[in-house]
Image (cartoon, rainbow, N blue to C red):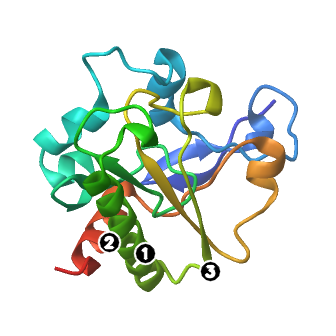
Amino acid sequence: MTSYHSDEFDGVPTDAAADLAGVPDAFQRLWTPHRLVYIQHGQQPDEHACPFCRAPQLSDEQSLIVARGEHAYVLLNLYPYNSGHLLVCPYRHIATYDEATADEVAEIGELTQVAMRTVKEVSRCDGFNIGMNQGRIAGAGIAEHLHQHIVPRWALDSNFFPIIAGTKALPRLLGEVREEIAEAWPR
């Protein structure tokens, strides 16, 4: 097999796929190494490492927080289903909705409404999935700290990636999305 350089990436020559080991196929590969920590270490942190308790102690940029309220705050999901996937979390470390105070419930609801309006303005989405997974058995990624998902949806956002390949292509970086939503958040 002869090797030749067919293309360049940042000035570095790359080999043609036909010259590499293996049988060429029709699959495109989407490499997502940042998810390795999530996969290897599982979803549930130990009881002293709750990311939702730690996030408010960091800067908004570090923790991806877009807005803070008195009883709850809003941040981007580190492993989003779609660009702009937000979480609304109470500051207090509680596991289920029935443990929330009336003030926490009211503010979670209010922040959810503002988040929907803001994301709709910023991303021009067509709809939302909103929900809470209560407990590990119900699919809660962080079961010990209550959080509500706000997932923007677009009319044409379903394709073969998530349906067949179990993969989601995200066109925007988290920092860019956080900055855009935080700037558009009503003061």
Residue 117 x %, y %: 42, 80
Q: Residue at x 44, y 31 (%)?
A: 142
Residue type, mark 1 in image? Val
Please tell me whether mark 3 sits on a helix, a strand or a loop.
Answer: loop
Residue 180 x %, y %: 30, 73
Mark number displayed over residue 5: none
Q: Nearer the viewer, residue 83 or 96?
A: 96
Q: Nearer the viewer, residue 157 or 89?
A: 89
Task: Please name the residue that numbered disc 1 is placed on.
Answer: 119
Task: Please name the residue that numbered disc 3 is placed on.
Answer: 126
Q: Residue at x 82, y 55 (%)?
A: 160
The N terminus - image quarter: top right
Task: Please name the residue that numbered disc 2 is placed on.
Answer: 181
Q: Residues within 10 Å of mark 3 (few under 14, many from 20)?
A: few
Relative placement, left or right, of 120 versus 49 is right
Q: Residue at x 26, y 56 (%)?
A: 103
Residue 176 x %, y %: 33, 65
Q: CA distance from mark 2 to mark 3?
A: 17 Å
What count of labels does the image hold? 3
Q: Residue at x 20, y 34 (%)?
A: 54
Please tell me whether mark 2 sits on a helix, a strand or a loop.
Answer: helix
Q: CA distance from mark 1 to mark 2?
A: 7 Å
Which of the 4 quarters of the picture holds residue 118? bottom left
Relative placement, left or right, of 65 versus 57 is right
Please tell me whether mark 1 sits on a helix, a strand or a loop.
Answer: helix
Of the numbered discs 2 and 3, the one sitting upstream in the chain is 3
Residue type, mark 2 in image? Ile
| Cβ atoms at labels 1 and 2 below 8 Å apart | yes
Q: Nearer the viewer, residue 143 or 33?
A: 143
Residue type, mark 3 in image? Asp
